[in-house]
Image (tube, grey):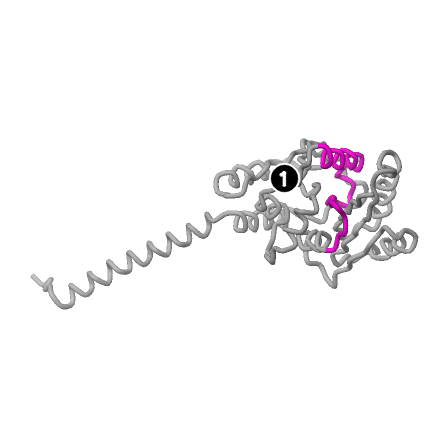
Amino acid sequence: MKKISIIIPSYNEEKNIPLIYTAICVEWKKSLVDKYDFEIIFVDDGSQDNSVQEIEKLVEKDERVKLLEFSRNFGKEIATTAGINHCQGDACIMMDADLQHPVNLLPEFIHRWEKEKVEVLIGVRKNSKSDSFIKRFGGRIFYKIMRMISEVPIVPQATDYRLLDREVIDAFNKMTERNRITRGLIDWLGFKRRLLYFEADERAEGEASYSTFKLFKLAITSMISLSLFPLRVASYLGLGIIFVSGILGIIMFLDRYFFDWNF
């Protein structure tokens, strides 16, 4: 049977970890157990609660569960990258630990991957029951700016809930960027993509670890990483400064050696 790797970055999600594990197992037994094997890779991103202990309990009772534990918090992008680097499946599916990404879509992800022979299947959020007005408004502004300045095709409301074929996984693992936006790098690779729309659920337990400031920081990193526009602006500004400095230097030279401005 083909194997599917499910990659779940986790930061302070001790209450959600048993819930998402159970939800995945239940969904798998419904329609996938006879066709596919799976592994669940939890990547603990330096949690301060009992997330690691909860994952270790699952590892002890189910050999399909793996744990990658970071020494400190490195951020979701690095955690997701680590999961992709270590997965063994013919395809991988990335999803959040808070159950906002509907587990019941897993069969559809896999079915479309097999039937349509797509290499990247992107989960696109139609609505979110927990998003604030500021987050929704900021998201619209961000995507409008990215469409204007980015050389990478950006899908509005695209999420990290996506499936990657093994060919994409191998290509992604060759990339060495440190300050990275995972979904942006996947889009940049240019493989055959399809979209899967869904409505995001509310968090099962706890509060989101991504504050407004972190989201703003992520947006700035995206603009810098996925566009040459900031580099071009800096280059044009540098050339402008050099040009103006050169003109002023010529004027000062002529004034000193050739002109007498005293009347």
The location of residue 134, given as percent across then percent down, is: 62, 38
In the rendered structure, which amino acid carries the disc numbered 1? Lys
Q: What stretch of residues is rendered in magenta?
A: 86-115
Outermost residue, front direction? Answer: 1
Looking at the rendered structure, the secondary structure element under dot 1 is helix
Q: Is residue 95 magenta?
A: yes
Q: Quadrant of the C terminus?
A: bottom left
Q: Which quarter of the rendering shows the N terminus?
A: top right
In percent of the image, x 90 and y 54: which residue is there? 57
Q: Quick check: is 60 in the magenta stretch?
A: no
Residue farthest bottom in this picture: 257
Which residue in the protein does label 1 denote? 135
Could you tell me residue 90's position as x and y percent? 75, 46
The answer to whether residue 26 is left or right of residue 131 is: right
Q: Quadrant of residue 99?
A: top right
In the foreground, 163 or 74: 163
How would you rate the neighbour count of disc 1 (Cα within 10 Å): few for under 14, some for 14-19, many for 20 or more?
A: few
Q: Position of residue 64 (x, y in %)?
A: 86, 50
| Residue 198, image quadrant | top right
Q: Residue furthest left?
A: 263
